[in-house]
Image (cartoon, rainbow, N blue to C red):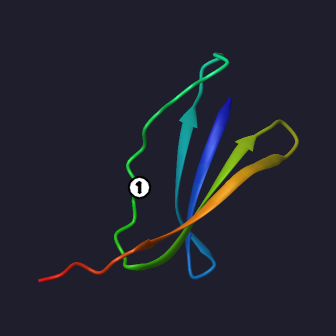
Amino acid sequence: ADIILAFSRKGKVRRTANIKLGGATRYRTWKRIPTDKAGQWTVSILQELEDQDLELGSMQFTVAAPTQ
């Protein structure tokens, strides 16, 4: 399956990442989260189909500002 991860902040997609999954029943992969700005983020998981993109789920998370 062709999977797209869309990373959004303030309601706009800031970055995307493409992942190619194999044909196994259970599949696990790792991806570094490319968030370089503090704030509320949402990652949406989409499956790219021939005629549409199917949203499989989403998750919100917070990136904290670095402490000095």
- Residue at screen point 48% across, 32% down: 29
Residue for point 57% across, 25% down = 27
Q: Position of residue 10 (x, y in %)?
A: 57, 82
Q: Is residue 57 above or below residue 30?
A: below
Give the amino acid type for the residue marked by disc 1 in the picture.
Ile
Q: In which quadrant of the rendered view does residue 26 lie?
A: top right
Secondary structure found at label 1: loop
Residue in the picture at 67% in, 18% down: 25
Residue ID at (71%, 53%) = 57
Point out residue 50 in the picture as x, y percentages from the top left corner.
83, 36
- Graded by Cα atoms within 10 Å as few (under 14), some (14 to 19) or many (20 or more), the crowding at tag 1 reads few
Q: Residue 2 at what x, y percent from top left?
A: 66, 34
Of all residues, the one furthest to the left in this rendering is 68
Asked whether, in this view, residue 57 is left or right of residue 12, the answer is: right
Q: Position of residue 3 (x, y in %)?
A: 64, 40
User: Quadrant location of residue 13?
Assistant: bottom right
Residue named by callout 1: 33
Outermost residue on the top side: it is 24
Is 19 situated above or below 7?
A: above
- Name the image quarter holding the C terminus: bottom left
